[in-house]
Amino acid sequence: MVRPRGELFRITMFFAVVFLAVTFSFSFSNWGSIFRHSNTYELHAFFEEIGNLRIGSPVKLSGVVVGKVEKISLNSDYQAEVLFRIKNEVKIPSDSSIKVVTQGIIGGNYLSLTPGVSEQALRSHATIERSHSAFIMENFINKAISEFGSKGSNK
Amino acid sequence: MMNIIKYINFTISTLTAAPSSWKLFLKTLGRQLVLLGSDSLWLIVIAAVFTGMVFSIQAFLSLDKFGAGISLGEYLPITMYRELGPIIAGLVYTGRSGSFVATEIAAMKSNGQIDCMDIMGMNLIPNIILPRFLAVILTFPGLVMIFNVVGIIVCFFMAKFHYHFPTVGFFENLKYVIDYKLELTMTVSKAIVFSFAIASCSTYHGFYAKINAEGVGKAATAAVVWATFSMLVLDFVITGLLA
């Protein structure tokens, strides 16, 4: 028979462990980032092609993760509008450019920032004007084949 | 068909029952929380440790063929949260605690305790069934969360000490891996739905057990079989709805 005091202690300990597990899961998921918007700022970019870029894909600068993609939508000019958040401590020069890069041969896509030389930093809700779309292997192969084919037929 | 109506009726009357004596109700609930929750903790942790280790090795074998072995830390947490956590914790919990609930109620019935309470005018469902039902619902989702977290920590140690991967930023990287819409919604909704399935199956089969030694054994078997079956079907339904 379990003694009542021991019972209460064991129930408390059990729920304390459950609380720790729930806190761990929520703080290490991007759920936590919803409540942590104060540490980040928002930027936009428009692309002709984003490939496999997803919500949650990282934004990197010199290979270091500095933020992540939060929203992807289509604008009236049929361009992909990507909204991403950058850590407050990272200041991006206003003439920086951004491109969609593929991680390895089978990896997912991510955004890569190339910093410019301007001394003025981008503010929250600003748009990065210089953007380079994703490199799609199929498009490249199709273009190469058609060009090669047309050269061959000219001979 | 009649059994399904009886089962639905039993579950609804359990969920709508109000305890007559709060003192007795809380005492039974406290005892059940210990027996079903903290006493199952070690089994859930052991299941999570070994599942995490085996799955790390298996996942690495497949990923390494494509040169993506380093993605182990991204692959395992997703599998843990979406599928392995709820279903393995559910099967282990059904075998340990679901069968316990069914056997305890069936044994009370075959000993004549339930008849005595009935003659004394005690309301059976709020005093016997409801605390056990609630104890399952309160403990199981928590155990699923513990299973997931232990699984991820084991994966971290496997990556660090067995495969010698650079694990700097392993936990920081989870932010890009665990998407709240898919992983957390899936694990929480599965845990809650499974807890209702386990609670209703085990209390129902215990309460309607035959009054003999065989009846007790059959009640435990039926509780485990039906809870497992309903969990597997519900798993497919929830995955289909949320994916």
Image (tube, coloured by chain):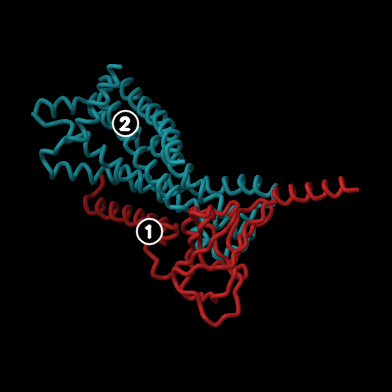
Chain colours: A red, B cyan
Residue lying at the far top of the rendered structure = B2
Vertical order, A72 against A115 (above or below): above
Say which element carries label 1: helix
Residue at image coords 25%, 41%: B134
To which chain does the residue with label 2 belong? B
Work out how far the residue at label 2 is from the one at label 1, CA to CA, in angstroms: 30 Å
Residue A112 is situated, as x and y percent measured from the top left of the image, at 60, 65
User: Residue tagged by mark 2?
Assistant: B202
Residue at image coords 28%, 27%: B204
Q: Nearer the viewer, mark 2 or mark 1?
A: 1
User: Residue tagged by mark 1?
Assistant: A23
Circle 1 residues within 10 Å: few <14, some 14–19, many ≥20: some
- Please name whichever residue, A121 or B10, is drawn nearer the observer in this view of the structure: A121
Vertical order, A115 against B97 (above or below): below
Residue A139 is situated, as x and y percent measured from the top left of the image, at 70, 49
Residue B211 is situated, as x and y percent measured from the top left of the image, at 25, 20
- Please name whichever residue, B2 or B117, is drawn nearer the observer in this view of the structure: B2
Residue B118 is situated, as x and y percent measured from the top left of the image, at 13, 26
Residue at image coords 50%, 57%: A56
- Please name whichever residue, B116 or B165, is drawn nearer the observer in this view of the structure: B165
Left/right of residue A6 with respect to residue A114 in the rendered view: left
Left/right of residue B29 with respect to residue B38 in the rendered view: left
Q: Is residue B154 visible?
A: no
